Image: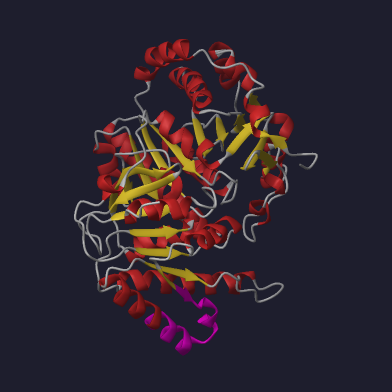
Amino acid sequence: MTINERNVDEVLTSYQPINKEELTKLWNEVRPSFQHKVIVLDDDPTGVQTVHSVSVYTDWTKETIEKGFQEENQIFFILTNSRAFSAKETEEVHRDIAMRVEQVAQAMNKPYLIISRGDSTLRGHYPLETEVMKETIERHANVKMDGEILLPFFKQGGRLTVDNIHYVQYGEKLVPAGETEFAKDRTFGYKASHLGEWIEEKTNGTYTKEDVTYISLESIRKLDIEGITEQLMNVSGFNKVVVNALEDDDVMVFSIALTLAMNKGKRFLFRTAATFTKVIGGISSRPLLKRDDLIEENLSNGGLIIVGSHVQKTTAQLQALQTVNSLHFIEFDCHLVLNKDAFQQEVDRVRKEAEEKVSNGVTTVIFTKRERLDLGEGMKEEELKLSVEISEAVTSIVRNFEVRPNYIIAKGGITSSDVGTKGLCVKRAIVAGQIAPGIPVWKTGEESTFPYIPYVVFPGNVGADTTLKEVVIELEEIKG
């Protein structure tokens, strides 16, 4: 254990537990006063990691946003997949969405709350997304946004925030986020683990760590609703609020104070991980999904599994999956993207081999070459263009697949987004729930390439080394 790492159990037991009975009483008193429509803009499809029975839309036309507002559910998701966008594209999309949401809300006379659901390991277009929405909303609604809430806690993925430092769990250790592989991301890298310092780093000093409001675990565990509400009432000038959390109940305590502050007229934007969306959306917990919950039409065909993410955890999970002898594995040599003809031949080869196996009842795993394509220094833009070509090729395999699989799994945030929107051509899906902690399942809509198929959206950085294998074993009904 390095000097900055901490032991999970020691951290979890170092704070007094919340009085759950009192918390439930407070929640039941305050929650009914929260009447806002909650719109979650998801920068990849994994933001539904904690919810069930809610809609995910894959476009953001005014008509789609109106449908979301008209739903009985208080919350709906829009999959922007902005983590795969350039900064310019991200800016355009978030300006359009914020303007349309404001127009619909005014027409329907409905208060709303927008959450920019970002990666729990702090990658993504921050602060760009929320800054663009702030400017757009203020211009069209003639209001001032008081502040921005940052809440990257997501326990199912092992992302905990304590003493204002964000940690990623590895086994029994908590490693500061800035010391993990995620902080070395080629596009969205960072150095700071202290969230105040991270904000200062990401905003180039526009917002300093000294100006950040910190909601401490001590206040949360004491149920100091009045004190936390007062902290929120004092936020202005779009300054930042960092929320510490070790359990979902911590988020619930904060949400009570937040509701009270909003009832008094405070307005915030949100950059959070998946847990906050569940809590503020009033989504109940439900047991993990089983095969019988998902596969109603038991085809003789096999399933189809696409593995695209290159993070270490995905590679380890793929290696564990390769011990399942009944599966067929196909390596997709994506480095052939440098040769257009050879690349197209490789795409055709992989698809035809997979179709043959799946039609014969053999679940097939297509995985991209594990080594990243590295063109050298100063070639990031070119690498990004090639990665888009590779992603489009992978999704074309799904879109053109001539056999209906029993189920589909896509591994990796961008991979699962592209498979869902461009491969399965989903316009609206319903989140069925989670098949493992932090791993959601969509039921595709009737417009999809494969209507009503169970589609497992498997984040690249979630789960233990054996989790992908365990999910496949559940869906395959393989007896352990």
Residue occupying image coordinates x 55% and y 83%: 338
Specify the quadrant that holds the N terminus.
top right
118 up-or-down from 365: above or below: above
- Pinpoint residue 384: horizontal percent, then vertical percent: 56, 69
Quadrant of residue 21 in the image? Answer: top left
Left or right: 219 in relation to 417: right
Quadrant of residue 220 in the image? Answer: top right
Quadrant of residue 431 in the image? Answer: top left
Left or right: 402 in relation to 255: left
State the residue lying farthest toward the right: 3
State the residue lying farthest toward the front: 480
- Pinpoint residue 223: horizontal percent, then vertical percent: 55, 13
394 up-or-down from 443: above or below: below
Left or right: 418 in relation to 385: left
Residue occupying image coordinates x 68% and y 56%: 184
User: Is residue 356 in view?
Assistant: yes
- Pinpoint residue 119: horizontal percent, then vertical percent: 54, 47
- Residue 12 magenta: no
Which secondary structure is most common in the magenta stretch?
helix
User: Is residue 44 in view?
Assistant: no
Residue occupying image coordinates x 68% and y 50%: 180
Nearer to the camera, 251 or 259? 251
Q: Give the colour scheme shown.
A: secondary structure
Nearer to the camera, 367 or 281? 367
Q: Which residues are magenta?
A: 330-348
Looking at the image, how many numbered discs can be counted on the residues?
0
- Residue 336 magenta: yes
Left or right: 1 in relation to 230: right
- Pinpoint residue 290: horizontal percent, then vertical percent: 32, 44
349 up-or-down from 210: above or below: below
